[in-house]
Image (cartoon, coloured by chain):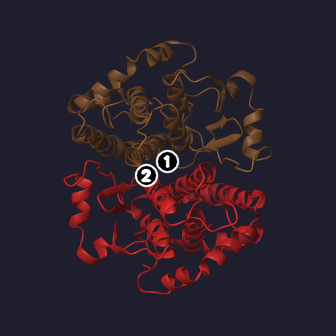
Chain colours: A brown, B red
């Protein structure tokens, strides 16, 4: 079966978490909007072709199934492609970590869009600076502290977030670190020495053959100022 | 087994979604912080007593298990107390709806806290008004439209979000409508006539014997201006 991924075609965004899992799994998939345009995605969101209408992309079609919400899709893929433990306890812990990272994603996005998604950055620039003044010194280290602690407390060692094998949570952490380095290079350069396990895990994922090949390919959309992680130097405080 | 719920003791917040599921299931549970103070919750968050340290409450202890993230806890309870379909398809669809509602919860919260959780409302009041100017006319109807459409397209009829039986997603929708009516009474009074299925489902949940008894009891913490849904008249535009 060939998966169909529906996501905005010009940003990494939330879709990138799904792409990374599909790439690591060497799963066969079509990035539909990039190949065939946006109409199929709009049909899915309008709910004309499914009883399970998604609120927003990313959306994964797996046979007749239509699945949305990043963490939900990853839980589905994790079970099918050995990217999560098979047991309920490990499966739920992996999911919990993903949900925590998803919460952080919203915080990172809202640094540059504190007032409304529907306004341009330039219309909320002053407010973005105030939000960055909380995010960078308070929320960002709180998130990094948490991840480092999860790695420290992993009874199987600090090479992975869950147990002794790669899970989709590791792939998602890699993506967050990529995004944070793009958006907040000065802050990350300052903070990273305090998080050796996190930095090590990022490097370990980056060096996985399929992830490395994907990251070097044209398939990987570069970060840009339309996505979730954006580089506005005045917010990198 | 008696569950232990750990959550802030003076607000409904995210913990209320768990309380409603436990109440509807007639599950035995202790609302630990309200009964015994906050130290147990802080120990769990500090990770001194678990390999699966939570980032934030709500946290559910089920025997030796420590589970966090609202949607993750509800998925766990849904499977054990028949508050979600047993099959994977229905289980994931219920979870997807919960995740979408959780996203909306953050948006509703950030109306009054657009800049930082660490600042008081009064320190971001002007920005909150600007955010409300987007949330109330744009995001709120978009969310209500979506829920109404899910109900309309449910092949089992519009009495429930998923299939023909109550799920935790219905309980969570009830809670959102309660919160929205508290925070935005004028906007909701204006909008609700357009959403008859949503309003009907809220009433159906409110009239379930266990929910009605719980809502009328001292156990239900009243909405207040420390919680997620807050009533600031200037934001109810």
Asked whether disc 1 touches disc 2, contact meaning CB atoms under 8 Å apart, the reply is yes
Q: Who's the residue at 33% across and 51% down the image?
A: B55
Question: Distance between the Cα atoms at labels 1 and 2?
Answer: 6 Å
Along the line of sight, which residue is nearer the eye, B197 or B226? B197
**x, y percent for residue B145:** 72, 58
Kind of element beneath mark 2: loop
Q: Residue at x 57, y 48 (%)?
A: A116
Chain label for disc 1 = A
Residue B52: give its label.
none
Horizontal side, residue A60 vs residue A126: left or right: right
**Can residue B118 be seen?**
no
Crowd class of label 2 (few under 14; some 14 to 19; many from 20; radius 10 Å)? many
Q: Which residue is mark 1?
A: A114
User: Where, quadrant-wise, is the N terminus of chain B in this rendering?
Assistant: bottom left
Residue under pointer 2: B115
Q: Is residue B232 visible?
A: yes
For the residue pair B192 and A125, the one nearer the viewer reads as B192
Residue B194: where, in percent of width, then height?
A: 77, 67
Chain letter, disc 2 residue: B
Mark 1, other Cα within 10 Å: few <14 / some 14–19 / many ≥20: many
In the image, what residue occupies the spot 34% across and 71% down?
Answer: B2
Residue A177 sits in which quadrant?
A: top left
Q: In the picture, residue A18 is in which quadrant?
A: top right
Looking at the figure, which quarter contains the C terminus of chain B? Answer: bottom right
Q: Is residue B155 left or right of residue B205?
A: right
The residue positioned 77% from the left and 64% from the top of the image is: B157
From the viewer's side, name the closer residue of B92 and B20.
B92
């Amino acid at each position: 079966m060939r998966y169909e991924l529906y996501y905005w075609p010009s940003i990494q965004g939330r879709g990138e978490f799904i792409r990374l899992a599909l790439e690591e799994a060497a799963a066969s998939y079509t990035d539909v909007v990039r190949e065939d345009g946006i109409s199929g995605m709009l049909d899915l969101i309008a709910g004309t072709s499914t009883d399970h209408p998604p609120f927003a992309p990313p959306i994964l079609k797996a046979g007749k199934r239509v699945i949305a919400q990043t963490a939900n899709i990853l839980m589905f893929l994790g079970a099918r492609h050995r990217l999560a433990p098979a047991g309920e306890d490990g499966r739920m812990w992996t999911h919990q970590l993903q949900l925590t990272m998803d919460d952080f994603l919203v915080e990172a996005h809202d640094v540059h869009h504190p007032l409304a998604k529907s306004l341009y950055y330039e219309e909320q620039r002053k407010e973005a600076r105030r939000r960055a003044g909380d995010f960078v010194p308070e929320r960002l280290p709180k998130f990094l502290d948490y991840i480092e602690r999860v790695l420290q407390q992993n009874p199987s060692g600090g090479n992975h977030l869950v147990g002794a094998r790669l899970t989709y949570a590791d792939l998602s952490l890699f993506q967050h670190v990529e995004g944070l380095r793009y958006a907040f290079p000065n802050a990350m350069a300052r903070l990273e020495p305090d998080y050796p396990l996190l930095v090590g895990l990022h490097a370990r994922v980056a060096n996985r053959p399929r992830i490395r090949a994907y990251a070097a390919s044209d398939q990987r959309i570069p970060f840009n100022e339309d996505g979730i992680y954006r580089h506005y130097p005045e917010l990198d405080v």
